[in-house]
Image (cartoon, coloured by chain):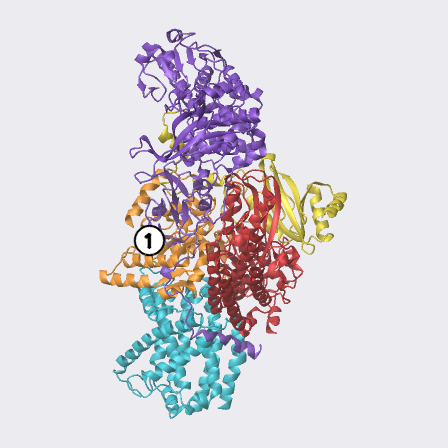
Chain colours: A cyan, B yellow, C purple, D orange, E red
Amino acid sequence: MSFEWIMIPYSLLTLFIVINYGLLLTALMQKIGARVGRRHGIPIWQNYIDLLKNYSIRSSITHGVMFYLGPVFRLTGGVGLLLFVPTIFGSEMFSNLSFAGDLILALYFIFFGSLGMALGAGESGHPHSAIGVSRGLSQVTTSELPFALAVFAVALQYQTLSVNDIVAAQQGGVMNWTLFTNPLAVAAAMLSFLGSMMRPPFDVVLAPQEIPIGPPTEYHSSYLALMQTNRVIFPIAKMVVYMNLFFGGAASWPVFFLKIFLIYFFSLFIGVVFPRFRVEQSVRWFLIWAMPLGIAAILVV
Amino acid sequence: MQTLISQLQTRFQLSEFILQRDNLAFVTVTREQLRPLLLHLRDKEGFTHLVLLTAVDWIEDNIFQLTYLLGDRTAGCDIGVRLMLPRDVASMDSIHDLWPTAATYQRELREMFGIDFPESPRVDEDFILEGWTDLPPYRRDFDTLKYSQESYVDRLGRETKDPAAYMKLKLYPDEDNDG
Amino acid sequence: MSVRDLLSPFIAWKHLFREPVSIRDPFNREASERYRGFHQNDVEKCIGCGTCEAICQNGAIDMVIVEGVEGIKTRPGDSGLRPRIDYGRCCWCALCVDVCMTSSLTMSNAYKWVENDPDKFRYIPGVDKKEWDNVKQGYHRPDGHRLNAPERIEMPELEPAERIDSFVEIVGGYSVEQARLEADRCVTCGICVATCPTHMPIPEYISAVRDGDYERGLKLLYDSNPFSQICGKVCTRRCETTCAASHEGDPIAIRWLKRHITEQVPYEKYRDIIGGPLPATGKKIAIIGAGPAGMTAAFDLARKGHEVSVYEARSHAGGMTRYGIPEYRLPFETIQREIDLIVSMGVEMHYDTRVGTDIQMQQLQQDNDAVLLAIGLWLGRGTRIPGADHPHVYKAIDLLRRIRDGEQLEAPKSMVVIGGGNVAMDIARSVARLQKQQQGEINVTLTALEDKAHFLADPVEIKESIEEEINIIDSRGPQECVSDDQGKLVGLRSWKVLSIFDDQHRFAPTYDESDEQLHPGEWIVEAIGQMSDVSLLGDALTEKLEWDRGRLQVDDDGHTSEPWLWAAGDCVKGPDIVSAVATGHSVATSIEAMFEQKEAQNA
Amino acid sequence: MKDDFEKLLDQQPEKEPEPQERPALRDIPVREELVPRTVTAPDGQEIRIDPLQDYYCQAGPTVQTPAYTRIIEDLFNWARAESLWILGFGTGCGAIEMRPLMTPRFDAYRYGIQWRPTPRQANLLVISGYLSVKTLKRAIRSYEQMQNPKYVVGLGSCTINGGMYWDSYNTIKRLDDYLPVDLYITGCMPRPEALLQGFDDLKKLIRAGKAEGANKYAENFERYKTNQKRVIKDWDMPDYSW
Amino acid sequence: MADAEFGKADRSQYPHRRPDGSLDIDLTSGKYLKLWQGPNHPGITGNMSVELTVCGDEVVEGKTHVGYLHRGFEKLMERRTFIQCFPIVCRICVPEPDFNEYCYAAAVEELAGLEIPEKAKWIRALILEMGRINSYLMYLGGQAGAFGQGVIGQWTTYARDLMLDRFEELTGARIYHMFILPGGVRDDLPEGFDERMEQTLQEVERTLDDVYDTMFRNAVFKKRAVGLGYVDPALVDEYGITGPVARGAGVARDVRKDQPYLVYDQLDFEPVTGRESDVYARADVRRRDLLMSVDLIRQILSKMPHKGEVMATLPNVLHWKIPRGETYIRGECSRGEYGYYLVTDGSGYPRRVNVRGPSYTHAMALLEKLIVNVNISDVAGLMVSLHTYPPEIER
């Protein structure tokens, strides 16, 4: 695929849609979670207000350059991830900047954000941030490992490193999805997915009851707003990757919305009802349960 | 309870025995005998539970009363061992080695009454108060209302009238009632 | 880790499609029926006694002056103050509601109050209008939940059967324990002090009873009332009518507690406790009449060091307490102790000395720096109905005096008393005793214009009279003292009273003439009021003085229009022993002030 | 808002002519970890550490004016009002009613109210009842760590005039001496419904642009600090802590 | 298990003790980190703090700091009359205030020689059990929350809210009931209270069923709670441990049974005990104790006399004096033994009141002991499992 200038406004449009969908979706997820807790939960538009509010805070203080760059890196990671994988399969407008090797780039971006965050939060000097970062890095590392293995398995399976091609290979019926063609890889990836969504049982990084609230402790006003923006983009971007790799991608926005919702809901479904693991417990959990699955997936392929 | 006390009385010099209830008695003991008595009660008589340790300020008599309340949970009865301490040399031997939890009580007594327990762990650390510079607040000669009014500012504009005085002012102002 | 442990938690998801349990509109949710919310006060019921302030451990309540609100005025029984509550202090424990003496203070179930000015959280419930003023729900003191005993400790008394045939004192007096319990009921509000004519420090001496410090109590008593022993037995105790406890229970037995103090202190110690007179000043004062008013003034002035002479027409001091009150209420001994105490302050007594005959007013005026007229009300008023001039129609006051003087009266077989005041009760009960002693049977009828609820007599008197088989017939207007053909009195004819006063509250009784009764009686006693005998003044002086409807006109201090002459006691105000004491005090103060003024002029 | 504050300023001189210094019965030691010291780094370099200077910033707060046009400021105020983030700091017994507030029965999330565990992200400090001197110190620090605009709600009668601890030696009586308070909710404890009402009223204040406590604090920084230091004897923190 | 291995980790880098017993910790060495949890910390129950010295992820020393809620109650009571003390005592323990009211009232009654009506005793017991349910419900939410399971707290707080409604209609207040005053209780039960109580109890039971399924039968919760915070039964006496913490260690001590007060001798129950003495066992003891309270309330409501006074005749409370004496009254609250030591001197004011809250021993000496070698993540869960309420420590 060759680069065309029109792809830039197109991908910005994608970004716009995804941000809005993300804002609404996270609110919706909160509402669903609240329902389980027998209450109504936040209004569906609450995230917009919170975002606006945080941008409108008048004062902000910084702990150094990295502190400032942390959220920027994180946002870059989210946006980058989104932009370099095709959002809607087969659509000229919403394929974004995907290219032949985009799968590797995607993996890189997934990690990039966390690293940026780690640097920024580390700079803030707050012990809770520091603890959160060390926990985060160890957990992310182990949780991404099965994912990487799964991706590797999938790449092997389809013999390509282009997300687009992988999606293309899954077209033509539900049974063609990686979900069914390579269930082990999907299982490994989904377990890893749980680990990256910052929901119980793998939210020890944030853990409000222990280290309020982990890495972002010191972040506020526009920094926080940046992070919030990222928090709605990044999971979706990530889920786009998942959707493309394992669930047959999406050929239209409605299908996209539905699939993203379901994938997101999966993490919620588990997260609402479990407490969290300690960090070494979750590391061990990933190594014991998810890693073998990933390795098995490769071996099967 | 009664029999226990009479047994104790043969071994220790006890005074002022009060049987408050069937299952609660208070005895007064001398400083030297406190520790043997506590040990005896704990190890021989089954009073293994240190319920509380606190002080009472009898400022008129210039003494602090220390009350060691021990409980026998199996028999469901308690004995309060009282010890009179001169107020001006308020210092007492620590019993944290008998009950580790006594250290906390002793820290509080040190802070709130100014009764010292040398050897008790962390006894000089701030416990409840922080940066307190006045008299230990639980002492009777510390006036909390006075301190409060001196340190903090009440909201202005409050005043009250005594009904009888106000009626006098209003109904028979000229009269002098002193006879 | 079992599979069950992995799956079981997902049960939580069953709530997903259930309606949330949140309250739809939490802004308008009503609190429960009993909720202790913001205060309400029925300001018209409230008497401003300040008990709420006393019990509030937060110092949240101030008693503040409320002006310009209808129904709130400083008057006997109402201080005119109202509680203001500081919601920067309140903790909604409702002790103030529980202790409220009139149940005027209650709580609504309103609970929302947000303000950005912290000074606005102070308000006077009932006066400062709030939206919860008319809310019905909320905490009110539950029935039977009292923080102080509503019932008076009963006074040990002789049973009617034991007392009816003698003049032995009925009331036994409290024991120390009983007195302490009764004193315990007092809330120390001091509302009563204003009502007491002589403003005795009632809460203080009740506190003394509570503390068992009777000597302090006695000092307090005698500082304001040298007739404390007597008042402890026969005071009209107007204080008790305004007692805060009387609104929801029995008033404190203030009189009995006063009596208790005087009984507990040995008489020998009285003089030491009260203290002797000051050094002599050389000023001389003459007092005419050794009743409560005269003797009070004598006591006050003698203690100041003045030379006081009292002129009494009768053979004993005490005035109306000696000659007007039956012995079963006030034994002689009590009076004597009181008088002896006053005399011991250096008062010179001249018994059987009638001013006007034995000594002249002019003489007194010349010999003294001041003269006090305390001659009381010794002439009984008559009804002037037909037949009232019959020799067996008596004035109550005369009969009482004769009985107290020890005269051996022969009681009639039957007797009718006209009047519903204390004097009427006294004579009825005294004669009843004589009847019981002499004939073994009581036949006394008491009629009055008023209905029983409006009798002027003390309710206790009425109750005891009924116990003593006095036949009380209320709302009867006397028309004629009927005699038979032999001129023997047979009884009183009366009509039923429809109303006593007209629209302008003037005395103008109307009768139902169809309802006529004849109350049989060999004697008829009129007990409808007394007047003073002012003949001693002499015509010239009588002419000079100012008069108001038959009474001497005096200013607030008892000063007459003559600079050297004061008047006090029943002859200016009353009849009532404690008022007499009060006027005695004020005259003494006034005379003292006059002396000081003169001194200042001389100097 | 201005009025009552001026009133408050007027009141001060009459009541407190001079801060009463009580003779110290014992010296308050500086906490071990706050003592300035010299440490040797692994590479042999000597580093001078003064924790009170190094970890915190001494600069006072500044007044932050609304820098936008009216319409944008209004929009921002609306957003601020509809997104109240409460600092999860239960300073007194009032904290007990915060839990029902955030749970199914009252579900304050419905009204845009959430709690945040860190002062940096919170913009509403709820002083839930009495403040002991020891907590006051922490509350002040938490407040100062919050970002402008920030709001303070005093909850319960003890924040207004001492409440039932009016004669206690260890609790402050008037919150507005130490922090700028936007609203008070009376009660002991105020019910969750009353709290919701209070937050609703606070929203109105914010929307009207009247909740400028942070600027008030900056303007009168000296006075607040003087008051704070009068009661907090153990002042082992810089005047202002970012 | 893996955890056991974890416990056997290399200890060479851990600080050793100085001769005086304190730990030899050189903060400047960079090996250790001082970490304050609280007072502004959501994982801490109430307003208190723990000063942790951590090495890696593990706590080497923990010091409890209290006093943030100190109001000086014991001092304030010395200048309040006996009745004036009654509204302030309940503030000593916010989540379960009724034990303060009961213990104080009972102590005053004993020293004043006041006998309270039979019915008042039943109502008092009812209120105490209702308070216990509230306290436990709050605890369950907190325990799950400390391990990151928020939904339990939502449910239990709702159930607690319903119970607060019952409190409100009975006592006239939600949190500070101020209903048990010396001499009895303020008022009788309101009309129809029994039925509404029954509905609430059923809702509580339903909630508990859910809680049991989602919290107690939860792999992750077990992973976190089992084996954490082991309390040696031998420590029970040494550290003055009472209540569910002791019962979780298998020591069947319950004041309701050992020294029955009010009407507990007429009720049918057995103390609930556990065996493992870890966080999970304590949570389970409390859950079963809660169910027992539900049963006790049913018993109380059915056995309670229908008629009768609820308040003894008090002397005028404005000048109520109590002769010289001293006594100690205890009750079994949801955290353990709650007691009041009251000394009177014949005046109208208490000479000395000392409140013995169970948290006093649990949160100080015991917590400081248990917290050593615990992972930072588990500090909150461990603290909550001791069920401490700071205001009763510092009063």
- Near-viewer residue (C127 or B161): C127
Say what amino acid the circle numbered 1 marks.
Answer: Gly
A107 above or below C544? below
Q: Can residue A87 be seen in this view?
A: no
- Residue C563 place in picture, x, y as percent: 33, 13
Q: Is residue A203 above or below residue D158?
A: below
Is residue E29 shown left or right of residue D5?
right
Horizontal arrangement in the rendering, residue C469 relative to residue E236 (left or right): left
Of all chains, the one bearing label 1 is: D
**Residue E102 position within the rendered picture, expressed as x and y whole percent measured from the top left:** 55, 51
Closer to the camera in the image, A142 or C550 = C550
Q: Where is residue D24 in the image (x, y as percent from the top left)?
A: 49, 40
Q: Is residue C598 above or below residue C574?
A: above
Residue C439 visible here: yes
Query: Where, by quadrant of the figure, is residue C86 drawn?
Result: top left
Residue drawn at x 32%, y 75% as measured from the top left = A19
Secondary structure state at the residue bearing disc 1: helix
Residue at the disc numbered 1: D213
